[in-house]
Image (cartoon, helix red, strand yellow):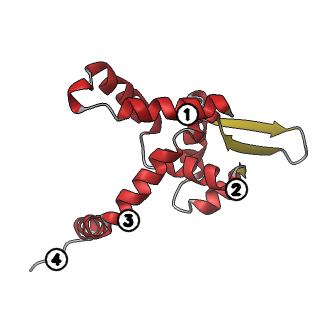
Amino acid sequence: MQVDTCSVSTIMIDTMKPKSEITDADARLVEQSMDMLGGKWKVLILWHLGVAGVCRFGELRKKLPEITQRTLTLQLRELEADGLVHRTVYAEVPPRTEYRQTAPAKDLADVYMALKSSSLAHRDLLRARSEAIAWTASPSPRTG
């Protein structure tokens, strides 16, 4: 437990640097992290695993009803390859597979909470964006 706490503290100290002390190397590290978390679903998958602790594939599908089976499978594989998700397969009939966050993924809890706080603070902006996307995606009326 102490190691996890130290890791979180180190991250917090590094991100609290004055702007003048943020280097290109820091930016590359953030870019690598964003690559690991990129896409529409990865943060949401990690969020649900963090809340539930352990989830089976079907449970994640229920929590994310708009995700396709293929996309969820690919996202989970990428998260596992990046060391953010641990997959346990039980030799049972039918087979049972469970997913949980790894320690590095748990260290991102502050990031998830910051995203939540920002989303709540800027709810009107997000709603306007959603409405604009829906409006541009809707079929245009026919003329003539």
Q: Is residue 103 above or below residue 115?
A: above
Q: 10 Å neighbourhood of mark 1: few (<14), some, or many (≥20)?
A: some
Residue 78 is tagged as: 1
Residue extending farthest to the top is 25
Circle 1/circle 3 CB separation < 8 Å: no
User: In this rendering, which labeled residue sits more in front, label 1 or label 3?
Assistant: 3
- Mark 2–mark 3 Cα distance, whole angstroms, equals 29 Å
Q: 10 Å neighbourhood of mark 3: few (<14), some, or many (≥20)?
A: few
Q: Earlier in the sequence, mark 2 or mark 4?
A: 2
Q: Earlier in the sequence, mark 4 or mark 3?
A: 3
Residue receiving disc 4: 142
Residue receiving disc 3: 120
- Mark 1–mark 2 Cα distance, whole angstroms, equals 18 Å
- Disc 2 residue type (three-letter): Gly
- Disc 3 residue type (three-letter): Leu
User: In this rendering, which labeled residue sits more in front, label 4 or label 3?
Assistant: 3
**Relative horizontal placement of residue 110, taking residue 131 as reference (left or right):** right
Q: Residue at x 60, y 61 (%)?
A: 63
Front one among 62 and 25: 25
User: In this rendering, which labeled residue sits more in front, label 2 or label 3?
Assistant: 3
